[in-house]
């Protein structure tokens, strides 16, 4: 679908911009495991090395990716395992006992810019212990900001603002299970400030989430784009929302994160939304 003619739908989700990813369609069915019927779940830790980037629910535990720390908790937010990580960790997904995360290594100057020293990196961790297994550094010049997995074990990795494409374009990469590039894709008419902050899957579509503002700070009329199985745009709309969401069955939980002064630690929480997964899918 041509991005210029894509249908714009306002869905009005609670909170700020999307960050969380989701896996296969089974995570979004009414029979899927449910989170407790409570008003909120707060991470019972005080991360100080960066704000919340993503949350994942595997049916038993919650996984929280802060910029510099990973947490595994029970469904009350009590920490089971934690790990300090040395680089910018963002989108994550848990599959087959492994935790995979998009890593943006700030080994370049100026900080935050994409340079020839920037390489797409996928971190692989043991989902039980959060011990690092390997950092897969790919021969792709870009900065990874989001991640989702396909059924065949390959990845979609969304990138932060690259300097070699237009300001109204964003890029994502399809990466094989062998951590080699299958194909790179560029979407047009997406003038967001920071690139693709979220990729998450619902059914046969992947939803790309953005902060919803342009480089000059103007509010855009979309903060989410759905792409089909051929990685072409199928829909766009404004979901609103906080740091992200977690899905359990047909329910959505909105994630937020706030820095507390003067100690500078972050409080991260997920809360049930009035919006459901079916609401989101019906916006297509």
Image: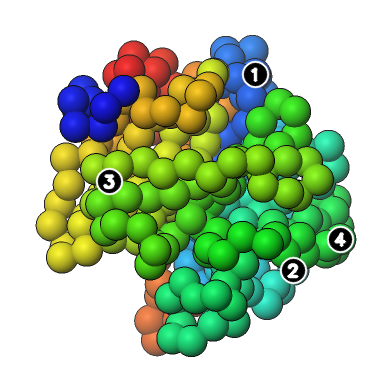
Q: Is residue 175 left or right of residue 8?
A: right
Q: Name the residue under label 3.
A: 190
**Of 34 and 51, the residue lying toward us:** 51
Q: Is residue 225 above or below residue 51?
A: above
How would you rate the neighbour count of disc 1 (Cα within 10 Å): few for under 14, some for 14-19, many for 20 or more? some
The reply to whether the C-beta atoms of the residues labelled 4 and 1 are less than 8 Å apart is no
Q: Mark 4 points at which residue?
A: 133
C-alpha separation, residue under disc 4 versus residue under disc 2: 13 Å
Disc on res. 83: 2
Could you tell me which residue is drawn at 72 percent across and 64 percent down?
137
C-alpha separation, residue under disc 4 versus residue under disc 3: 35 Å
Rendered image quadrant of residue 94: top right
* In front: label 4 or label 2: 4
Q: Can residue 87 be seen from the camera position used here?
A: yes
Q: In this view, does 27 lie above or below 245?
A: above
C-alpha separation, residue under disc 2 versus residue under disc 3: 35 Å
The reply to whether the C-beta atoms of the residues labelled 4 and 3 are less than 8 Å apart is no
C-alpha separation, residue under disc 3 versus residue under disc 1: 30 Å
The reply to whether the C-beta atoms of the residues labelled 3 and 1 are less than 8 Å apart is no
Disc on res. 26: 1
* In front: label 2 or label 3: 3
Q: What element carries label 3?
A: loop
The reply to whether the C-beta atoms of the residues labelled 2 and 3 are less than 8 Å apart is no
Instruction: Give coordinates of residue 67: x percent, y percent.
Output: 56, 68
**Of 41 and 245, the residue lying toward us:** 245
Q: In this view, does 95 lie to the left or right of 116?
A: right
Could you tell me which residue is drawn at 68 percent across and 62 percent down?
139
Instruction: Give coordinates of residue 8: x percent, y percent.
Output: 19, 27
């Amino acid at each position: 679908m041509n991005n210029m003619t894509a249908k714009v739908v306002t869905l009005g989700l609670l909170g700020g911009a999307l960050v969380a990813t989701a896996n296969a369609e089974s995570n979004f069915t009414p029979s899927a495991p449910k989170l407790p019927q409570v008003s909120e779940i707060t991470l019972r830790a005080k991360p100080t090395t960066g704000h919340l980037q993503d949350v994942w629910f595997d049916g038993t535990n919650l996984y929280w990716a802060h910029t510099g720390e990973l947490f595994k908790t029970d469904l009350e937010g009590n920490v089971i395992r934690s790990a300090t990580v040395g680089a910018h960790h963002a989108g994550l997904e848990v599959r087959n006992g492994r935790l995979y995360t998009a890593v943006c290594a700030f080994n370049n100057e100026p900080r935050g810019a994409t340079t020839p020293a920037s390489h797409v990196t996928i971190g692989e961790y043991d989902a039980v212990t959060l011990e690092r297994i390997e950092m897969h550094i790919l021969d792709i010049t870009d900065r990874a900001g989001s991640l989702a997995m396909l059924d065949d074990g390959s990845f979609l990795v969304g990138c932060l603002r690259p300097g070699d494409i237009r300001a109204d374009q964003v890029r994502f990469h399809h990466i094989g299970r062998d951590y080699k590039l299958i194909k790179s894709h560029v979407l047009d008419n997406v003038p967001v400030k920071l690139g693709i902050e979220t990729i998450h899957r619902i059914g046969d579509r992947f939803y790309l989430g953005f902060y919803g503002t342009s480089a000059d700070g103007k509010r855009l009329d979309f903060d989410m784009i759905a792409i089909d199985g051929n990685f072409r745009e199928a829909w766009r709309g404004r979901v609103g929302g906080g740091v992200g969401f977690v899905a359990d069955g047909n329910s959505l939980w909105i994630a937020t994160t706030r820095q507390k002064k003067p100690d500078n630690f972050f409080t991260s929480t997920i809360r049930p939304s009035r919006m459901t997964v079916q609401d989101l899918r019906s916006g297509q």
